[in-house]
Image (spheres, rainbow, N blue to C red):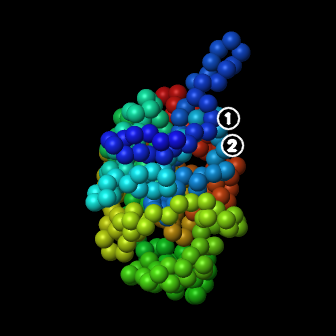
Amino acid sequence: MWVDIGGRRLFFDVEGVKLAPRGSSVDERPTLILIHGAPGLSDHMTFKPHFTKLAEHMQLIYLDLAGCGRSDEISPTADYSLDNWADDIVAFCKALSIEKPLVLGVSGGGMVAQKYAIRHSDHCAGVVMANTQAYFDPARAVEVFYRLGGAHAGGIAEKFLTRVTQLEEVAEFNEVCGPLYNRTPQDPQRGGRMIMRERVATAFHRFGDGIWHEMDMREELVNVTCPVLLMAGEDDPITPVEDSDDMATFIAPELLTYVRLADCGHGNWLDKPEESFDAIRDFVTQSARR
């Protein structure tokens, strides 16, 4: 499905009902908007089918960011930014009359979720920042790749994350370092289900001046006034757990729930689904009641 936002379309999919019959009454379930990571290299399919198990507790809205997946670009000449993507969440909710949603972003989507919480805390019931970072420190990531994959993987990661790379080096990184993202084997076909968009991928990932390399939201996190669930995996090589530790120091402790899981890589639910989905369900349910 698509919705028009300022003359361009955002694609979304819905799983789970908003209103559920319960005897002679009706339960209104919270709405959780899911924001995928790796803009341009990923889309909402990254959450499927994993999040289906939450659909009996809440309404799930899977959203493709502007320029990603099946959504339209902002415009052929417009620049992408975390600010614009964050503001799009507000416009999306206005178009569909969604009030006080919860928003979950993973990895790059977690960066969008942070900016949304910084700019629009009063718009939501809470935000889940999963396996993400407020500032990119490549040395931290390289150190984890060395620990998990030895000198070969560490060296490839160091080349890929600390300088401009050629196309063949991207393929090498994906082949050698990709399997280290998680502690348990993942579906090798999941990448084929996603739509790649080169322009936004370049804007986000380009070494030196890409969004990922330039951002620093650490001190801005003090402006967050909504409840936050921060999720981190202790074996996450691309958004290391120390990045979440840093974020936790800037978020008001009375607003923060921090779930840090051992033996977890990038996307806690991919390695420890039960613990991860329990934490998300509890946070969403409690935040929606406030």
Task: State whether residue 247 appears in this view.
Answer: no
Of helix, strand and loop, which one carries label 2?
helix
The answer to whether 6 appears left or right of 28 in the picture is left
Q: Determine which quarter of the picture holds residue 203.
A: bottom left
Identify the residue under disc 2: 53
Question: Could you say where residue 66 lies in the image, as x and y percent from the top left?
Answer: 40, 52
Report the residue at 31% width, 58% height from top.
76
Q: Is residue 140 above or below residue 127?
A: below
Q: Nearer the viewer, residue 54 or 216?
A: 54
Instruction: Report how far apart the C-alphas of labels 1 and 2 lie in the structure.
Output: 7 Å
Residue 223 is marked as none
User: Callout 1, which amino acid?
Assistant: Glu
Q: Are marks 1 and 2 in contact (CB under 8 Å)?
A: yes
Question: Could you say where residue 148 lies in the image, as x and y percent from the top left?
Answer: 61, 77
Report the residue at 43% width, 74% height from top.
138
Question: Could you say where residue 26 lies in the image, as x and y percent from the top left?
Answer: 62, 18
Q: Nearer the viewer, residue 213 or 36?
A: 36
Question: Could you say where residue 129 lies in the image, as x and y percent from the top left?
Answer: 48, 51
Of helix, strand and loop, which one carries label 1?
loop
Q: Determine which quarter of the picture holds residue 23.
A: top right
Assess disc 1: are there few (<14), some (14-19) or many (≥20) residues with their C-alpha within 10 Å of its C-alpha.
few
Identify the residue under disc 1: 56
Assess disc 2: are there few (<14), some (14-19) or many (≥20) residues with their C-alpha within 10 Å of its C-alpha.
few
Q: Is residue 1 above or below residue 216?
A: above
User: Callout 2, which amino acid?
Assistant: Lys
